[in-house]
Amino acid sequence: MDAPTTTSSAGNDGTGGSSGDWGWFTPSRKRDEDAPQGPDQEADRSAPSRPVSPIRPVGRGAERRLPAPDPAPARPEQSEPPSPGAGAPPAGDPPAREGEEHQRPTETPGAQDVRPAGLFSDGPAGLFSDDRTASHDAVLIRRTMAEIEPIADKVTSYFYALLFVQHPYLRSLFPAAMDSQRDRLFRALLTAAKLVDDVDILTEYLSGLGRGHRKYGTRPEHYPAVGECLIGALTRYATGTWSDEAEGAWVRAYTTISQIMIDAAAEDELRAPAWWQAEVVGHELRTPDIAVVTVRPDQPYPFRAGQYTSLETPWWPRVWRHYSFASAPRADGLLSFHVKAVPAGWVSSALVHRARPGDVIRLGPPAGKMTVDHSTDNGLLCLGGGTGIAPIKALVEDVAEHGRNRPVEVFYGARSDHDLYDIDTMLRLAQAHHWLSVRPVVSDGPTKGLSGRLPDAVRQYGPWNSYDAYLSGPPGMIRSGVDTLRGIGIPSHRIRHDAIEELVTAGD
């Protein structure tokens, strides 16, 4: 779950490190004549549209070495028990990492750039090798990331310990159990490390995070505390690469990050609520562990077919999970989700086994770019695995509503015929629309459809040169699917899916 922390790096902006009396988050201004000069002092000359609260510098040298917190809060997810009535786990139910099936992550740029599941690995060459085209700040930031890669878990734990010990009022913004939260920070840092010099993509990515963080109650004054503790954690553990110069690069990066997110949240506040209340009006159990949940928002909810949202239940406050919309926007305003309960899945299990009509959940803003381009007549090649068929169904409905009669080929994958829980709906859609073809693909056991892995089944048909591809499902299916589609000639810019970094714990 994305948490109310800024977790990415940006390009040169603002000031920091040894830049005199300027606070880390003082808005950018034109460089004073007496300001330090050099590549790591370069700053964007345009002032941010909204100021960020200044905070005290961490300091330099020995002053930067923050004392380690007491052992008790070293694992912040256990640092304090949830307050009574705040959705604490029942007795005997220890916190466990949740692996929601078909969780949908916050949209990250370059979704077609599929990375390995590790937090830092990025192919054989590695992410952190020096790039001759990279800015000086980018090189410094990436060297720091490379150093802390082997001890990322320690750095993350120390960061949260600092945050909750020094700023205990922020603890209430986080879920009671932090297991699934902790790795999110450095995954986002990894993404930003790749984007530090690409301002346009970085701004798009961080703006989405800033808007999404409104649902946690994040305020502009929270960002300085997060930045200070982030620098404190890096200072403690990046001993080989840390210097005044490196600190300045990180401070400038975080200054840009926080300002982008604050501005995006402020703009979004003018046109949309931080969250929507939604009443459960339908609950259909399709299999013992898969339910179709239909809700009615308390006010209009704008979204596009193929997108997803974050969802919070009354049983687990501050625990948000991502689910795709299972239909295109409807005239009655209702929203549907396909949810599979997975082991240790707090939210998914509650939605499948506990939710009933009349219950009220909360929805975050819509996100995702796996949407149909209606300016072209290209066909759609859709691969949906497990509950990943939900957004594929929404895309089919979207094409039907636009009346263009574009060819749509759907490959619906599951482990067994029994797991094809929505096949009847998809076949009815195929009967109603001559331009739609639906092929079930089963990997295990006998079947009336195609046998084998979903990507392999796609190779048996085609050609797909004139099609735009859409993939939704478990991360392994997406990775192999992208490789297959590239191998048969579909260019990367025509392969669409939401980023899979946060799907690594999802089941099938």
Image (tube, grey):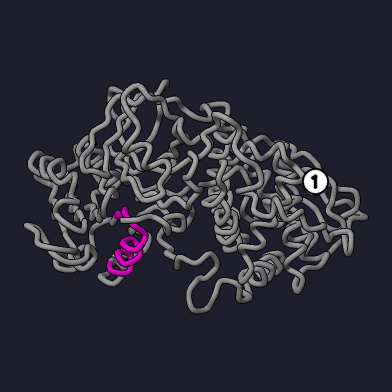
Does residue 503 sit above or below 239 in this rendering?
above
Does 479 appear in magenta?
yes
Residue that protrudes farthest toward the front in the picture:
92
Question: Percent x, y for residue 377?
Answer: 23, 49
Does 34 appear in magenta?
no
Q: Nearer the viewer, residue 233 or 136?
A: 233
Q: Is residue 36 visible?
A: yes
Does residue 370 sit above or below 67 in this rendering?
above
Which residue is at a point 62% across and 40% down the rendered structure image? 81
Magenta part, dominant SS: helix
Which residue is at a point 27% across and 36% down the rendered structure image? 292
280 with respect to 299 (left or right): left
Question: Percent x, y for residue 295?
Answer: 34, 28
292 with respect to 213 (left or right): left
Does residue 134 sit above or below 226 in this rendering?
below
Which residue is at a point 33% across and 39% down the rendered structure image? 325
**Which residue in the structure is indicated by mark 1?**
29
Q: Which residues are magenta?
A: 470-484
45 with respect to 424 (left or right): right
Q: Nearer the viewer, residue 85 or 294?
A: 85
Q: Disc 1 residue type?
A: Arg
From the image, which quarter does the C terminus lie in?
Answer: bottom left
Which residue is at a point 68% across and 69% down the rendered structure image? 139
Q: Is residue 198 visible?
A: no
Report the number of discs: 1
Find numbered disc 1 in the image and state the secondary structure of the residue it sits on: loop
Q: Nearer the viewer, residue 61 or 82?
A: 82
Question: Percent x, y for residue 366?
Answer: 43, 37
